[in-house]
Image: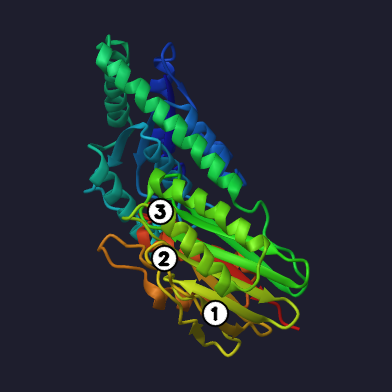
Amino acid sequence: MDVFLCSTFADLKTEREAVLAVVDKLQHQYRAMEFFGARSGQPMEECFKEVRSCALLVIVVGHLYGSLVPGLDISYTEAEYQEGHRLAKKCLVYIRDEDAPVPAKYHEKDPLKLERLMKFRGVLSDRHTIMPFSDAADLARKVEIDLEREARKSTLPRPPEATEIADVERMRARDVDFGARVQQQLLPRVTPVAPGFDFAARLDQARGIGGDYYDFFDYGDGRIGTVIADVSGKGLPAALIMTSLQGRVHILADHLYDVSHLMTRLNRSVNKNCPSNRFVTIIFALLNMRNGELVYCNAGHNPPMIARHDGSVERLEGGGPCVGILPDVQYEEQNARLDFGEVLLLYTDGVTECVNAANEEFGEDQLAAVLREYRDRPAEAIMEAIFGALNRWTGGTGFPDDLAAVVIRRLRR
């Protein structure tokens, strides 16, 4: 059984060596796969591959939170753990005695280090049975006992019904993984490239597969269409409806008359086939690259935001009801303009409704503040800032809902 050791290195060198010695002692059953010597410049995906290949994670937390992943306000240690937890890996968690004082050198220059550490400890305590340790020798003893126990479990005969359940769960997990890959392939592989404009887009599904969706349509005449949508619910049911929605949008967008006509026909089509307890919020926006004119139709979706060059943030209000509820709605288009140096943001409600540990929502005001602060940065940097703020808001514990966002920035002259 492969073991992944997940911990910081700067304050746990002795402890890490003690754990690796235990793994080496049990090498007929275990081997250590860990990346503490390859942090610098190591792509996060490479670390995740190692996590996925292991059956068991050993998480050791000391005084430090760990080195931050470039572009994200989350440490390698926590990111690796979150990936293991998402995949339902077995996790053995060991935390240095909380009575042990945290040396000032670990947080005096950056108080957030201590705050992040405490939040991470809280997440681990909520999810797992924590084993405290006092020193490297104490940690080694406890790890050896736990690994031997897990080894015995893995060799016990399993009743037939347990094997059948495990097989079904593996098949379900495989199908969901395949569905997630299919869903990713339905999204645009690249963002549009247009003189004078900068695009960025991102999608994060809470269960690996879900109902958020974005797309782009280049009409070749200086106009680019952008759609962002959110199917009610999460997981596989929402994903199935989203896939159907994506096909309908493509058919209608390929023969675009105007955005209100598109939305009216889309609503009629979805209403005929969507389950009665489901609906879709969606925006279709058509941007003229020559003059920045924006024509859009909003069906029950969060109002887009424009960060104006004077520092204000305008919410583009107006629109009709969600798609799929009423069959005979006649939607109307709205108009706006994106001037030089201004930024358009479209997003799903998973962004503003993202909650922290106190169950408080991130909200439109905080989102507008991030957009205002970073409006002069490239579109991808604005997107990184938004997701970084959401990670800080949640304490790096992952997002509870699907979320998607599109950033379109008109460059300054």
Dot 2: element:
loop
Q: Residue 166: give x, y in percent of width and height.
A: 33, 22
Whether residue 70 appears in this view of the structure is: no
The first of marks 3 and 1 along the sequence is 3
Figure quadrant of the C terminus? bottom right
Dot 3: element:
loop
Count of numbered circles in the view:
3
Q: Quadrant of residue 153?
A: top left
Which numbered marker is on residue 145? none
Residue at image coords 31%, 11%: 155
Examine the rendered structure and indicate whether residue 366 appears above or below residue 97: below
Badge 2 amino acid? Pro
Badge 3 amino acid? Cys
| Most foreground residue, 20 or 282 | 282
Which numbered marker is on residue 333? 1
Residue at image coords 34%, 60%: 115
Which numbered marker is on residue 274? 3
Examine the rendered structure and indicate whether residue 276 appears above or below residue 174: below
As measured in the structure, the alpha-carbon distance from the residue carrying label 2 to the one carrying label 1 is 18 Å
Whether residue 129 appears in this view of the structure is: yes
Residue at image coords 31%, 26%: 143
- Crowding around mark 3 (Cα neighbors within 10 Å: few <14, some 14 to 19, many 20+) is some
Badge 1 amino acid? Glu
Front: mark 2 or 3:
2
Front: mark 2 or 1:
2
